[in-house]
Image (tube, grey):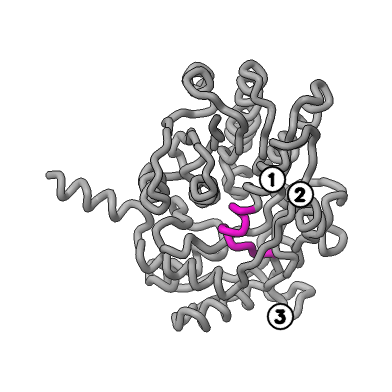
Amino acid sequence: MAILVTGGAGYIGSHTCVELLNSGYEIIVVDNFSNSKPEALKRVSELTKKSFISYEVDLLDHIALENVFRENHIEAVIHFAGLKAVGESVEIPLRYYHNNITGTVLLCELMQKYNVKNLVFSSSATVYGTPKYVPITEDFSLQTTNPYGRTKLMIEEILGDLHLSDNNWSIALLRYFNPIGAHESGRIGEDPNGIPNNLMPYITQVAIGKREHLNIFGNDYDTHDGTGVRDYIHVIDLAKGHLKALEKVMNRTGIDTFNLGTGIGYSVLDVVKSYEKVTSQKIPYKITQRRSGDIGKCYADTTKANKELGWKAIKNLEDMCQDSWRWQKNNPDGYTEEIKELVENHN
């Protein structure tokens, strides 16, 4: 019996595949490679010395997705696949609603048809919107501020209704805070398309010389240094959180929600200074205007995940910075460089 990982070639998906394989799980990966690269899956196999089945399939392609269920014995699904850029979601909301929500509905229909009712869903702290205070617990009111966040919240509600209709479903909703870092080998990491939307890949691209400076959006927030404070979590800790959630859904029925973060808030300047310290790379930056919709502080209360999943983030900010730099230094152009070399050698 295998674990189906949708979006398994992506940043968080690929790291979770490594942890699953190293823990003895059999996996099947489905990815359409719209914002990921097949090379990531080759490196997952290389790191774990294990092979696995992967399909280039879009969740919206119902026939192709059904073939995956028909050809394999699937026990549970970890669902990462989805479009994820907040800014882009504001520009093309219909694409986000159609891709993320319809894709999930089609996936759940097939899970229901093939009696696969164990699901770990990749949600987001964006469902909390602008919190009245921090740290954020799972029972905070939910109020998203952008279409991307609304797709996550709508999917959470859909999955709640699904469980209500059939209590044989076992579902974990994982609300991530800010994943950064990379595998300690430097072989897999975050490889964004175009200009990075997130802080750490932008910092690493400045460090490697791809960008001149970092823009810091606002230094007048009510924080210790005026810059925005977030809960940054190492992607390996996050991946291990999925394994703990998977164990839980496979051993009981029900639906539950968990924050996955460190419970510590770091400012943008904290991250920049830590990065400079551990890598000896200077990160020039400019203070610019706040971005619309940004908030001052956002970090998690992780008590519930600690108690109920037996999970706790253990890597610190220096680990996150060191591993991010190792990935970027070894892969200055992300996954594309090795693919180019392979093409050149073949010719």
> Earlier along the polypeptide chain: callout 1 or callout 3?
3
Amino acid type at image mark 3:
Asp
In-front residue for pair 178/71:
71
Dots 2, 1 in contact, CB < 8 A = yes
- Dot 2 or dot 3: first in sequence order is 3
Part of the protein shown in magenta: 231-240
Q: On the image, numbered disc 2 is attached to which residue?
A: 258
Considering the image in quadrants, where does the N terminus appear? top right
Overall secondary structure of the magenta stretch?
helix
Closer to the camera in the image, 281 or 234: 234
- Disc 2 marks a residue whose amino acid type is Phe
Quadrant (top left/top right/bottom left/bottom right) for the C terminus: top left
Q: Secondary structure at mark 2?
A: strand
Q: What's the residue type where badge 1 is placed?
A: Ala
Residue visible at 67% across and 39% down in the picture: 120
Q: Which residue is mark 1?
A: 245
The residue that mark 3 highlights is: 225
Examine the structure image and report whether residue 218 is included in the region drawn in magenta. Answer: no
Q: Residues within 10 Å of mark 2 (few under 14, many from 20)?
A: many
Residue 96 located left or right of residue 311? left
The picture places residue 129, in percent across and down from the top left corner, at 78, 52
Measured along the vertical axis of the image, is residue 92 above or below residue 124? Answer: above
Along the viewing direction, whichever of 261 and 93 lies nearer the viewer: 261
Category of crowding for the residue at label 1, using alpha-carbon neighbours closer than 10 angstroms: few (below 14), some (14–19), many (at least 20):
many
Q: Which is closer to the viewer, label 1 or label 3?
A: 1
